[in-house]
Image (tube, grey):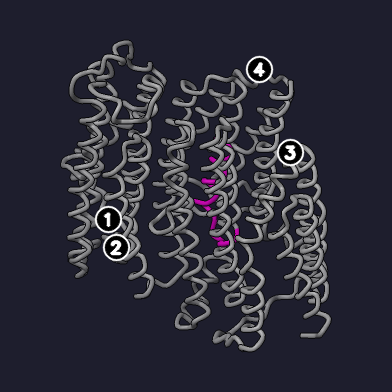
Amino acid sequence: MALLDELILLMLAASALWTVMTRSLLRSAIGLALTSAMLAMLMFRLNNPFAAVFELSVCAGLISALFFCIITITEPLTPEKVREEAGARFGRFRYLPVIVLLVGIVLRVLTVKVDVKIPALEEIADVRHFLWAHRQIDLVGQIIILLCGVFGIVILLKELRKKGG
Amino acid sequence: MISLLILLPALSVIILNLPFGRLMRKIAFSLCLALFVAQIFIVLLPVSAGFEPIFQFNLMVDDLSRVVLFCIGIVLSSALFVGEHVIKDDDQRFNFLNLLLIALAGMNGIVMVKDVFSMYVFLEITAVASFVLISLYRDRDALEAAFKYFVLSAVATVLMLSSIALLLLVSGDTGFSAINAAIITSQHSRLVMMAMGLFICGLFIKGGLMPFHGWLPDAYSAAPAPVSILLAGIVTKTVGIYALIRIVTLVFVFNDPIKYLLMFVGALSIVLGALAALGQSDFKRMLAYSSISQVGYIIIGLGCGTPLGIFGAVFHLLNHAIFKTLLFVNAAAVESETGSRDMDRMSGLAEKMPLTGITSVLAVLSTAGIPPLSGFWSKLLIIMALWISGYRIYAVIAVAASVITLAYFLSLQRRVFWGKLGKEFGHIKEPGFMMAFPALVLAFIIVAVGILFPYLAHEFINLKELTGG
């Protein structure tokens, strides 16, 4: 693994930790977008531009935008409450960076033995063709899951509008 | 043709949300009922494999799928009737119907796919629909329960996706047959064992088995009544138990570590679920713990690994879907009339609600495995399978837990339905056709399957082949 890849991996872990540990929802959403962007960069480096584009557009783009929308309609905490929550939050997650660091070191030092015969993957000429020819059921499933997600959000927003009115 | 079982519910949701809102709201109940009832009958007919002009779905329907598709139709119809009675707000009822259709598409997908990644996609559809359904009324307990389910479901998702990634690495494909072939070639590999273990643990969480059950009692008890019926009757059975049976019997290799793991988790769920149910005073919470215990029977039968054990597990899955749905319909009737789920506050309700009292007795006796009701036969088959294969200690545990089941359910009957009617319940009555109809149909199935089982077994099932004798 190249030094640059390791650096990206390190930044990915750092932004993921920040996402979990930060006390602000907005910063957490930004952290998630950064994590996705790092992951997309890794995918580009590993010669999978299609996966990288999906990761960048859907996770770093669309999902972050959805989070920002939701955060704008939530009620912020009072400054006193923020101070109280911040202490508890850091207390709860203080071991997390140590655990991530230890696991990283162990995985870096140990060589995981893959004791199976790994088949050669067939070359896919066109991802669009592959998705439509072989994964139609998953595409339909994704449409249904989007429908369901939209439904959940509509229920939430309708309820808020009722309360506001 | 079978792809329509996924496409039609999804299309129905789109159609219901087109303009002409008032008209669509009027036909929503009838449309849902038509789809659910059609599913019950379609699965009994021979079916063709795809809707070729547009889609080329890779689907299959075998006997196991038919049993689960039938259960889905029955349980969703019951939830539909109860929802019509219990959910008073028009908007909430319309949302409930839409989410019911999405859950139908999700569960039908799980049952018919032949690929682990597609199975994961449909597991997520069902899970997301369930989160929203649990929090439909947006009260604090329901939101907390939905959040717990969401978090634990996310853990299950991580485990399953990691497993799928490892399996893809090993087999180069995510289809059932390709993975099975790869696992047979390298079944002693630690990587393969890890992949199988991760997937099974993910399904244990989805199925709410001990010790992965943290979300289940809260979700079942805090959800609106028709959603509890849906969750307890079929959702956890499909996303957890059906998927486990399918994966273990068709994709993975049934080796000793998997057998021991399944039987240990099954026995743990049977005993701890039954003991936890003993101490409950909330009606729905007791049913939730009872569900964990009964699912343990399915898993222990599956873990036995013999044709008789697997047959008993699938039969108990069918029976459990029916009697647990009936018990939750009864709980909904009691809650809608008394406004409470606290069994210590109730007594003598059978005097005012005789139909609910009688159907509850039938469901309770079937759950405890009392002959000649349907639950007796499936438990008998599981215990016979354990005994014949030499797992006698597990057979003894299964019998002993049945006695505990009878004890806590008799306590439920005594506290809620028997004895002298409480003064504050003088005004209550049977809640009406929408609750009575599903209760009667489900009670009829329990009695009919129980009485006809010897005939059905004689005519359609080769018991000699199953017992190896």
Discs 4, 2: same chain: yes
| Residue at image coords 25%, 39% | B449
Tell me the number on the disc at residue B284: none
Quadrant for the C terminus of chain B in the image: bottom left
Tell me the number on the disc at residue B271: 1
Q: Mark 4 points at which residue?
A: B23
Magenta stretch secondary structure, dominant: helix
Snapshot quadrant of residue B254: bottom left
Q: Mark 2 points at which residue?
A: B307
| Residue at image coords 74%, 38% | A74
Question: Label 1 amino acid?
Answer: Val
The residue stretch that appears in magenta: B100-117
Q: In terms of depth relative to the viewer, which is nearer, B22 or B130?
A: B130
Q: Distance between the residues labelled 4 and 3?
A: 34 Å
Question: Label 4 amino acid?
Answer: Leu
Q: Distance between the residues labelled 2 and 1?
A: 24 Å
- Which residue, as the protein is rendered here, is positioned at the far top? B427
Which comes before the other along the chain, label 4 or label 2? 4
Q: Distance between the residues labelled 3 and 2?
A: 55 Å
Tell me the number on the disc at residue A74: 3
Circle 1 chain: B
Q: Is mark 2 on a helix, strand or loop?
A: helix
Which comes before the other along the chain, label 4 or label 1? 4
Pinpoint residue A41: horizontal percent, then vertical percent.
83, 70
Which comes before the other along the chain, label 2 or label 1? 1
| Crowdedness near tag 4: few (<14), some (14–19) or many (≥20) residues, C-alpha within 10 Å | few
Number of numbered discs visible in the structure rendering: 4
Closest to the camera, between mark 2 and mark 1, is 1
